[in-house]
Image (spheres, rainbow, N blue to C red):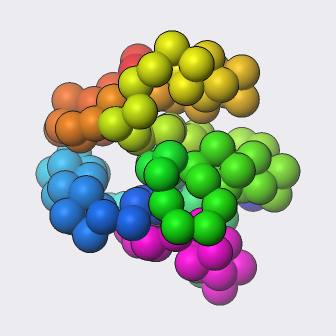
């Protein structure tokens, strides 16, 4: 079961993680925010700290890509709400995200995009 106050940000770009964190905490100051630079680090954090209720996941990262990571998280925590946050805006990427039940968020990230993801309107 996911911790409803835990949010995981997975992106190999440090600046992208900082931006998501900034927008997220401007909306909900009570979140326990975890950050990972790749899929392996994200899975280690989940093992150590517990499953997140929400996660934004970049597609292009070293090692496993964001789709692969999302599939692993979904298997372990089916109730987690996951968003693919990526600059890859091709129709095929959007379709793959939709097939997996992921919210698709195109970079650049914004406060409005994070808010829409949290409230389910994205």
Residue 89 percent coordinates (x, y): 40, 24
44 up-or-down from 5: above or below: below
Query: In this view, which residue lies farthest toward the bottom?
Result: 48
| Residue occupying image coordinates x 75% and y 47% | 71
Q: Is residue 79 left or right of residue 28?
A: right
Residue 122 percent coordinates (x, y): 40, 21
Q: Is residue 27 visible?
A: yes
| Residue occupying image coordinates x 33% and y 30% | 106
Q: Quadrant of residue 72?
A: bottom right
Q: Is residue 46 visible?
A: no
- Total residue callouts: 0
Q: Is residue 55 left or right of residue 80?
A: left
In-front residue for pair 108/92: 92
17 up-or-down from 56: above or below: below
Q: Is residue 40 left or right of residue 78?
A: left
Q: Is residue 10 left or right of residue 67?
A: left
Q: Quadrant of residue 98?
A: top right
In-front residue for pair 84/51: 84
- Which residues are the magenta region? 32-48
Residue 47 percent coordinates (x, y): 71, 79
């Amino acid at each position: 079961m996911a911790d409803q106050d835990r949010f995981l940000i997975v992106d190999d770009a440090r600046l992208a993680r900082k931006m998501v964190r900034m927008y997220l905490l401007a909306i909900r100051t009570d979140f326990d925010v975890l950050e990972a630079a790749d899929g392996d680090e994200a899975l280690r954090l989940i093992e150590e700290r517990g499953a997140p209720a929400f996660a934004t996941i970049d597609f292009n990262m070293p090692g496993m890509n964001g789709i692969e990571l999302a599939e692993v998280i979904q298997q372990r925590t089916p109730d987690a709400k996951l968003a693919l946050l990526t600059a890859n805006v091709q129709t095929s990427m959007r379709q793959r995200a939709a097939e997996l039940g992921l919210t698709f968020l195109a970079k650049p990230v914004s406060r409005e995009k994070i808010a829409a993801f949290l409230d389910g309107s994205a």
